[in-house]
Image (cartoon, helix red, strand yellow):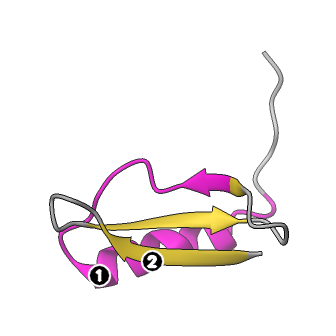
Amino acid sequence: MQFVLYNDAANQWRWTLLAANNRKIANSGEGYYNKADCLHAIDLVKGSGSAPVYER
């Protein structure tokens, strides 16, 4: 898996998480004005491995 960091059309930072087969698994869902904020969001996703899963 890999995270791809990029600028969107509004010149905001976004990320996409790709699987080993290059299929999109997740994306940032919002743009960030600062690259550091976008990188922090990636770190939050990386660290959420122990988050509970709920079924509705």
Check disc 1 and give the amino acid type. Lys
Residue 39 in the image: state x and y as whole percent.
43, 80
Q: Classify 10 Å Cα crowding around label 1: few (below 14), some (14-19), many (20 and above).
A: some
Magenta part of the protein: which range? 25-50
Q: Does the magenta segment cover residue 3?
A: no
Residue at the image position 62 percent from the left and 53 percent from the top: 26
Check disc 2 and give the amino acid type. Leu
Name the quadrant containing residue 17: bottom right
Please name the residue that numbered disc 2 is placed on: 5
- Per the rendering, the mark at residue 35 is 1
Quadrant the N terminus occupies: bottom right
Q: Secondary structure at mark 2?
A: strand
Quadrant the C terminus occupies: top right
Callout count: 2
Residue 5 in the image: state x and y as whole percent.
45, 77
N-terminal-most mark, 2 or 1:
2
Residue 24 in the image: state x and y as whole percent.
67, 55
Q: Secondary structure at mark 1?
A: helix
Name the quadrant containing residue 53: top right
Judge from the rendering whether residue 41 lies leftward or rightward of residue 14; answer left or right: right
Residue 3 in the image: state x and y as whole percent.
60, 76
Judge from the rendering whether residue 55 lies leftward or rightward of residue 41; answer left or right: right
